[in-house]
Image (tube, rainbow, N blue to C red):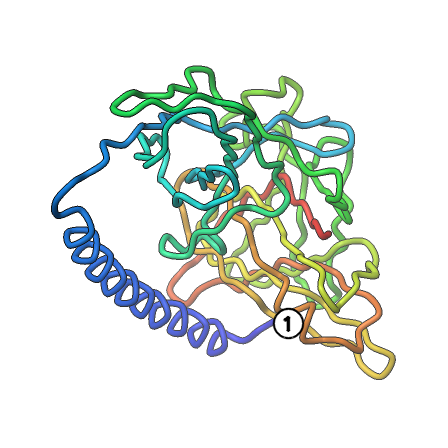
Amino acid sequence: MISIEQSRQMEYFYKRTKKRLFFVSGVLFYFLFFISCDKFEGDQQVPAFIKIDSISVRTDFNTQGTASHNIKDAWIYVDGDLIGPFELPCIAPVLAEGKHRITIRPGIEVNGISTLHSPYPFYERLEYENFTLRSDSILDFKDTLKTTYTEETIFAWMEDFQAGISIVDASKSDTTIVQISNPDMVFHDPGVLHTNRSGMIALTSEKNLYEGSGPEGIAIPTDNSVVMMEINFKTENVITTGLWVDTYSNIFQEAVLNLNTTTKWKKIYVNLTPAVQRNTDAYSFKAFIGSLLSDGNDDAIILIDNIKLLYR
């Protein structure tokens, strides 16, 4: 479990990085804007438009868990060339006419950072052959687009709290995670009627520390694997997420991301890839969650659901 000081340092690093990202985004916007102004002086091609309202996820609940998602944008390609990422809902301009191959990749906020967007490598790209684009006309994907998890996705660990709890409480914990079914507290997946339970951790001044991890170590290749952890959460206290790293000579923790307090359920995609790839001597990993009651709080309720540890 990381210390309060380490948590504060991580929070400071996040804020500093976010400011830098805003600055870089602003500079890029400035140059792209003025370059675009110069480019379109004189003869201008009138674009076609692609309209996308939303992208949802379809899953096999028994093998892939809930279909809950937090898809923020669509990365649009025409004949394999990136047109750009567009925040949903969007009407994207395309300088092309006639029949083309349209590819749409669902995008997310990596680690919940609003300035750090990326196509999600575990969601299938949507391919449409021979779509006709017409100048000054809108190609409207009227129905909600639906993606799925890719065939290459490996579900190393899932916890949805529907049938017991696979999370193992650490010996240092002075409280535990329990299964709850209070309809006013649990996460509700509108696509699955029987998701009526979630996990809850109650922290108090007397029992102020919790940590739990997956049930066993998972052998994840460290050379070129992409590793993510999905979590639905609603919390009155900061939650720390990361990995237990098991090497032949040592076992240690890598804290990756703090999840801040929120009064409503959120979905986040935690990027564990750097932590895995820099530990080339590790032979197994375990995902963990932990929380230490913040200074000034007498108690706090933490709600967790739909943990997925994925790699490919």
SS at mark 1 in the image = strand
Most foreground residue, 142 or 301: 142
| Residue plotted at (50% across, 77% down) | 6
Q: Is residue 161 left or right of residue 90?
A: right
Most foreground residue, 162 or 311: 311
Residue 292 versus residue 62 in the image, above or below? below
Which amino acid, by three-letter code, is at mark 1? Answer: Glu
**Badge 1: residue crowd in 10 Å (few <14, some 14–19, many ≥20):** some
Most foreground residue, 292 or 218: 218
Q: Residue 278, percent across and down?
A: 67, 75
Q: Residue 240, percent across and down?
A: 55, 62
Most foreground residue, 282 or 34: 34
Q: Residue 144, percent across and down?
A: 47, 20
Q: Quadrant of residue 295?
A: bottom left
The number of numbered badges drawn on the structure is 1
Residue at the extreme bottom: 249
Q: Is residue 18 left or right of residue 240?
A: left
Residue at the extreme front: 43
| Residue plotted at (26% across, 67% down) | 23
Q: Residue 19, percent across and down?
A: 29, 67
Name the residue tied to disc 1. Answer: 254
Q: Quadrant of residue 46?
A: top left
Q: Is residue 159 left or right of residue 143?
A: right
Residue 293 versus residue 269 in the image, above or below? below
Residue at the extreme right: 248
| Residue plotted at (28% across, 62% down) | 22
